[in-house]
Amino acid sequence: MIRLIRDRSTDIKRTRLLTFHFDGQPVQAHEGETVAVALLRAGQLTTRTAPNDQAPRGLFCCMGLCQECVVVIDGRVTEACRRIVTDGLVVEPTNGAP
Amino acid sequence: MSTTHDIAIIGGGIMGCATALRLAEVGMRTIVLDQGDLGLGASGVNAGTLSLQIKRVKLMPYALAGHREWEAMGVAVGFKKPGGYTLAFTAREAALLQERQSLKAQAGAPIRFVSIDELRKAEPNLAPGIVAASYCPEDGYANSSLTGRYYRLRMRAADIDVRERCPATKISQTSGGFRIETPQAPVKCVRLLIAAGGWIKPLAGQLGVDLPINVRVNTASVTERMKPLFSAVIGHATGLLTMKQKTDGTVLIGGGWQGRGTPQSGRGTVTMETVIPNLALAQFALPALGSARVTRCWTGFEANVPDFYPLAGQLPGVANAFVLGCVRGGFTIGPYIGRLMGDFILGRETELSLFDPGRDFNEELQ
Amino acid sequence: MTADCDIAVLGAGPAGANAAIQAATGGCSVVLLDEAAQPGGQVWRAKSTSILSAPANSESKAGDALRRAVNQSDITHHGSTRVWQIERVDDVWRLYLLQGNQTEKMTARALILATGAREFVHPIPGWTTPGVHGLAGATALFKDALILPGKNTVVAGAGPLAFFVASEIRRLGGQIAAVITPNSRSEWLRAIPAMSARPDLLARGATWVADLMTSGIPIHWRHAVTAVSGTSQVDAVHFQRVSPDWSPVDKVRTLNADSLCLGHGLIPDTQAAQLAGLELTYRAELGGWVARVAPDGITEVKNLFVCGDGAGILGAAAAVVQGRLAGLAAATGFGAQRSENLYQQLLSQHARAARFGRAATALALPRPGLNRVATPNTIICRCESLTLADIRDEIRTGATSTNAVKAGLRAGMGPCGGRYCQTAVSRLIEHTANLPEGSVAPPTPRPPLRPVPLSAMADDFNYDDLPISKPAPL
């Protein structure tokens, strides 16, 4: 086995960790990342259920178009892939409606 | 072999389709042409409000009959009858409401005035500051988007020829009736009904009839799903707001705010100069709407003549040609007046009288 | 009417940022607007602020250079800004912007649209399972947060993108279960002459493939993922050999994996162009429905230019050049001197880059057999959970336009605005109603271009300012 593309993961330096809450559970995130990325790292793939069939859904297009990753922050439907986490942020799943 | 239809109907909206269905009942060979999709002109893009509180006094019997038609169409068109409140926020609006709704009640609409307490109990999320409200239990809505689907299935079941995305490019009179050129094969017919909403004027013009039709460009907006916020149809004394929350949670907001464009130049476009105050008024009446995300705003063309009564009858001076349209509140009345139109074309007595397109539009309708 | 600036540019990717730079060089006042905080677009997306340091790659270097160039120019750059409405008022363009939860308005004399591409993911059974990401979408994870889509990933898709995604997963230390591509090796070999217009890019692609081969990672040529198992996470990925038209054939094979990156090519993002008044035509070789745009970005509407992948999928190299050409054309319209030399040079550069781009795009263009992958229960419209059977039944009653299917079923009325179903719906109508490819147009575009909070649209409101119109006749 010859690797032509090296594993460079150990060369990545990230910011400090902070904690926010998703669906009542604490989740760790690096300062500056999006809610969606933090949830993905935490293995929280399902971020809501779809309104018509209640099927689990999560991050899909990763670029603010598909609206699959929406969560509720401060009472507003928010794209998790575009919202930067902050310490103590409270994030809830939308679940059904909206 | 080219066949001659007993009647060709130009315009596959509610009125054209409802007329076609009436005519097909007695076996008339009917063809319906639409330049776009069935029921996706004004019929399919209006706000779907079925409210007696915004109907004209003289049209009330037609509106009451229209409500019965929609109720019978039922779930297939998303019909709901949660009742409707019309709100007044100022003394001037309250006076306007009192005057207008009293006249409509006298005309047969079961409208009554409610106390603010009663209103609050029914709709606790409405804003403070409401000084008067009227209520009509018959008010509701249908989902206008489903109009095309509903009529497509009905037309198919009735074995009516339908050509969608098939504009009438030229109409001419022949010895036996009319010949309509289209991008597909031409259509020959004995009778002709023009029921093309905002596009009636140029079509009638092809037969040498100049109808004084103007077109309004009504705007509507919709939000994504919200948790239940209100159940009734909400209106405003000035008519500048209608809103309803559908069973899926989306909130549809209208109020006759004007967009831009003409039927001749496409589908019309919204302009935020009018959408913004429409949404602001919605949020003023129901503050929780502020957190909703708006997903779409659009326009639809609403045709009218100077007296704002329908065109429904013989096309002046052209034998065997008819016109139906320009009905203020056409969504509500459409299925019913279409049926009357069918009766008229069949030479039958109509249940309620129609509206002669040859009348003097500047005189008070008798 | 006076405007806030000469030129507004929508999209700060390779096309838009270069258009802005070029126009500013010509002395125009330029405002560059983009959803992302920093310029770069999707292809050269900037790292998030959560990354203190990381090894560079070609994309990050190109992006950093672009960001430096924007910073050093006279451009006014508004990042984290969403343009949600475009209107033409009294000969100027009026734009409505969302910044945070606030609406801002601005006007410009000319408008350059560089809205790039969105991704086409053809619906397959299980594609809504969490853990399935768009193939292009996944690159955002690598570029922005340098995070992997899973621990063991199947990468599936056509053209060069699948191999780029695989290489990035490898670079970030991830594990790849397999790369599955409907292209055959001979299709790639046939594309090489055209791709040698950009030998640098061709060489990079060759390295990606060679790395997988020397590392013993399976590449399933002429195969496609046809289903995903799992409910709240991906348990397994199923795939099949495909015919040259990408119809699945032979037995189903299964890979254990916890994630899937899946894509079927890019689509020009044209909704802004439609709102600005441009008609679309179908150009299969450019990725589908596009406005008519000249190589220098000129369109049928005065003072409206389109450049980059939004005008047709030709890739970043072509986008850079078309961006400069569009910037030049726009500035020339406002009296800037145009160097004929530069103009001709850019035109020939564009032709060369476009040749590479067309070859890469051709490999990824979805083929008819893809329509056989979805089963009756497969969800087509993700927002409304509408299945293939739902939509096919509707088509069979005579709803043979995207507008009719949208009105009847709500496919396209959900929050994504049809961005993730309308291409599939068009294809399904064509397939079901036996219509030629490219005959079923996307639905009528409706603003806003993105969902906008009502409070942000409604703006400040004084009840007493309500225009009191004449009440409707009694």
Image (cartoon, grey):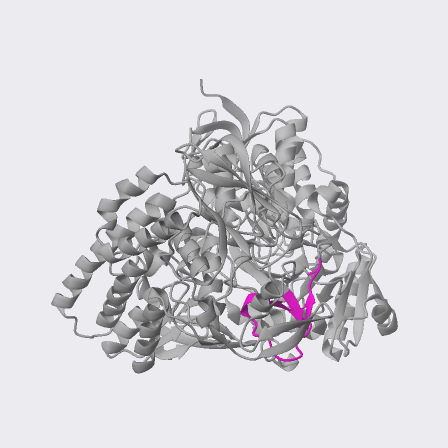
On the image, the x and y values in percent for residue C212 come to: 40, 50
Q: Can residue B261 be seen in this view?
A: no
Is residue C192 one of those drawn in magenta? no
Location of the N terminus of chain B (image quadrant):
top left
* Left or right for B230, reference A47: right
- Viewer-nearest residue: B40 or B20: B40
Residue at image x 57%, y 32%?
A: C396
Stretch of the chain drawn in magenta: A71-98
Q: Where is residue B48 in the image (x, y as percent from the top left)?
A: 66, 53
Whether residue B179 is situated above or below residue A52 in the rendered picture: above
**Is residue C396 at all visible to an observer of this figure?**
yes
Percent coordinates x, y for residue C156 in the rendering: 47, 47
B51 relative to C335, above or below: above
In the rendered structure, does residue A85 fall within the stretch colored magenta?
Answer: yes
**Relative depth, front residue between C272 and B176:** C272
Tell me what residue is drawn at x 58 percent, y 77 percent: C459
Q: Can you name the residue that lies furthest to the left here?
A: C341
Residue B134 at x, y = what percent? 80, 66
The residue most toward the top is B1
Give the residue furthest to the front. A1
The front one of A73 and C251 is: C251
Residue C183, above or below B85? above
Q: Quadrant of residue C8?
A: bottom left
Direction from residue B325 to residue C215 in the image, left or right: left
Q: Please tell me how many numbered marks the rendered image carries.
A: 0
Asked if C399 appears above or below C201 in the picture, the reply is above
* Residue A39 figure quarter: bottom right
